[in-house]
Amino acid sequence: MTDLVFDPALDIEALREAADAATDFLRTLANPDRLMLLCQLSGGERCVSELENETGIPQPTLSQQLAVLRREDLVVTRREGKQIYYRIADPKVLIMLGQLQQLFCPEV
Amino acid sequence: MTDLVFDPALDIEALREAADAATDFLRTLANPDRLMLLCQLSGGERCVSELENETGIPQPTLSQQLAVLRREDLVVTRREGKQIYYRIADPKVLIMLGQLQQLFCPEV
DNA sequence: CATACGATATATATTTATATATATTGTTTT
DNA sequence: AAAACAATATATATAAATATATATCGTATG
């Protein structure tokens, strides 16, 4: 019998609240387009047209998915002339990307 | 400028494949009921009625969400008389639960 | 003011969640 | 062994959320 990963002292309502917060976060990552965008942004900020070239995601889809990431405060933007640059704003994203890479990109 | 979390040598098609696999996994976890069930199971196997008592999730919902976890091979079952016992079958689940606990249950 | 860049709106399709009812499997009692 | 009961699974219907494509709009720059 392994140890509990979640402490039993964390009662059921507390667990449910934590689970709600965690699933909000997970749902936001759980889309291939958004996950790829975050991977690109993990290497530093990018403007929309750069992301479009790097990922091949069509612009309106890109814009919609970036809006989701903005709404969840996972990224922030900065305007420079006509370009809008995106960067990761939540450190949890980088932690989770590192973990996912270990689990799903073992060869790297 | 931080380092890329994902190696650039991982070209875009490879990245997309990894992203697809990762998002399948994330989507399965990205539901409060399923996440709570996995948290309970992280402490060792449980039968359905135990899970029902511990989580308060109504039985048909429980059974449906457990079916999702089975279909994705995240859990396996064992019958003992009338009871069916569930346990975690994929080590990635435990790793991810530990990570989520660090990110979302800092007080524990 | 024309053009480039990006955001927003709308429509449609697909997926996922939730509730209720019913079926299946196994156990216990007679 | 048949009947009654308990545990779990499945089916069906409906509602809600999400994804995807297309079209349109706004803003900044040259």
Image (spheres, coloured by chain):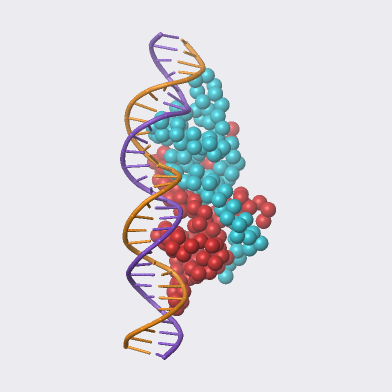
Chain colours: A cyan, B red, C purple, D orange
Q: Is residue A1 visible?
A: yes
Q: Is residue B31 above or below residue A54?
A: below
Name the foreground residue: B45 vs C17.
C17
Measured from the top left, where is residue A51 in percent x and y? 46, 31
Residue sitting at x 59%, y 39%: A90
Residue sitting at x 47%, y 46%: A30
Measured from the top left, where is residue A47 in percent x and y? 50, 28
Residue sitting at x 56%, y 65%: B54
Q: Is residue B67 above or below residue B25?
A: below
Q: On the picture, is D21 further left or further right than A26? A: left
Measured from the top left, where is residue B56 in percent x and y? 54, 62
Name the foreground residue: A56 vs A107.
A56
Name the foreground residue: D8 vs B72.
D8
Kindly indicate the quadrant of the structure image that contains residue A8.
bottom right
Q: Count of labels shown? A: 0
Q: Is residue D27 above or below residue B3?
A: above
Split into 4 quadrants, where in the image is the N terminus of chain A? bottom right
Measured from the top left, where is residue A87 in percent x and y? 55, 33
Q: Is residue B99 visible?
A: no
Residue sitting at x 59%, y 44%: A92
